Amino acid sequence: MASILGIGIATLDIINTVNGYPEEDAEVRAQNQRVCRGGNATNTLVVLSQLGHCCTWGGVWVDEPDGQRILEDLADYAIDIGACRVESQGKVPTSYIILNQCNGSRTIVHYRDVPEFNFADFEAINLSALDWLHFEGRNVAETARMLERSRQVCPALPISLEVEKPRSQIEQLFTQVEVLLFSKVFAQHYAYTDGATFLQAMQQQAPQARLICAWGTKGGYALETNGTLLYSPAFPPPQVVDTLGAGDTFNAGILDSLCHQQDLATALSHACRLAGKKCGQVGFKGLI
């Protein structure tokens, strides 16, 4: 069991399931509605907790009813919130999600009225007891300072960075971590059409890191620091019902294996299997 700190956001997700994505200016009836906690970092921690790890969330939450709902959910998975900052004003980040039950796709409209977790918040955390440190790739300037402090205080602590969306100057973070977890969306933004070519290009920017990229129904790719390219097929469920959080689950599978000192090929296959299982069920409960 590893002690893992995840830095990122928790959201309130309002998910409307529809029988086909609506056209613009259309009015459709939802088949059902679900309100739950979301957010990349906390999703990954919830999966890691079910895999037996001791997980802590570092982020910002607002002391209001929806904030309490988020904390109650994290408590169900034994996620420690001692590294968080609490705000008395504002609104927790909220995602309004349209889930197409025909193919499992999800479309998200996101709203937030709360400041980002910052360096001052991170500086107060005791890193010495950690086995792994994981960051969402956001709030780049502050994250750069957090990474620098981590190297000063605990130079041997393994660090991973999730790179889901293109953000200004995010590339400056790539040389500061051991593991980079890229999304297909990030790769396609730069016109790459396959994960292998993308990772080989990224290695020029982060030669010290192990590089991983989930590629949806095509599986996943990984690149060792020595240039060895790895591939795993996807493991789709009998029926895709909910792809929300599949990428976060994939990332949890990678971190779980690496925390157990398993090789990257094993980690990649494990991550694809977990992500496939997630797509076949609603939410994260009972995933393991």
Image (cartoon, rainbow, N blue to C red):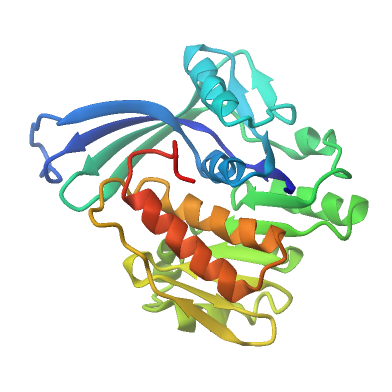
Q: Nearer the viewer, residue 265 or 208?
A: 265
- Report the label total: 0
- x 73%, y 68%: residue: 175
**Front residue of this view, candidates 73 and 189:** 73
Identify the residue at the far bottom of this view: 227
Residue positioned 40% across, 68% down in the render: 215
Task: Tell whether 2 sits left or right of 181.
Answer: right
Q: Against 235, is 246 above or below?
A: above
Q: Position of residue 239 (x, y in %)?
A: 23, 53
Q: Residue furthest right?
A: 153
* Residue at screen point 74% across, 31% down: 83
- Image-quadrant location for residue 222: bottom right
When the figure is inspected, residue 275 is found, relative to residue 174, above or below; the finding is above
Which picture quadrant has residue 210? bottom right
Say left or right for 153 vs 234: right
Pick the front one: 219 or 152: 219
Image coordinates for residue 238, horizontal then vertical, percent: 24, 57
Q: Position of residue 156 (x, y in %)?
A: 87, 60
Question: Would residue 101 be visible to someone looking at this image?
Answer: yes
The residue depicted at 68 percent of the width and 74 percent of the height is 206
| For residue 181, above or below residue 95 | below
Q: Is residue 169 visible?
A: no
Q: Is residue 180 above or below residue 204?
A: above
Image location of residue 204, percent across then percent down: 64, 82
Q: Is residue 256 left or right of residue 26?
A: right
Task: Please name whichever residue, 280 or 91, is drawn nearer the observer in this view of the structure.
Answer: 280
Quadrant of the rendered structure where residue 33 is?
A: top left
Q: Is residue 51 left or right of residue 183?
A: right
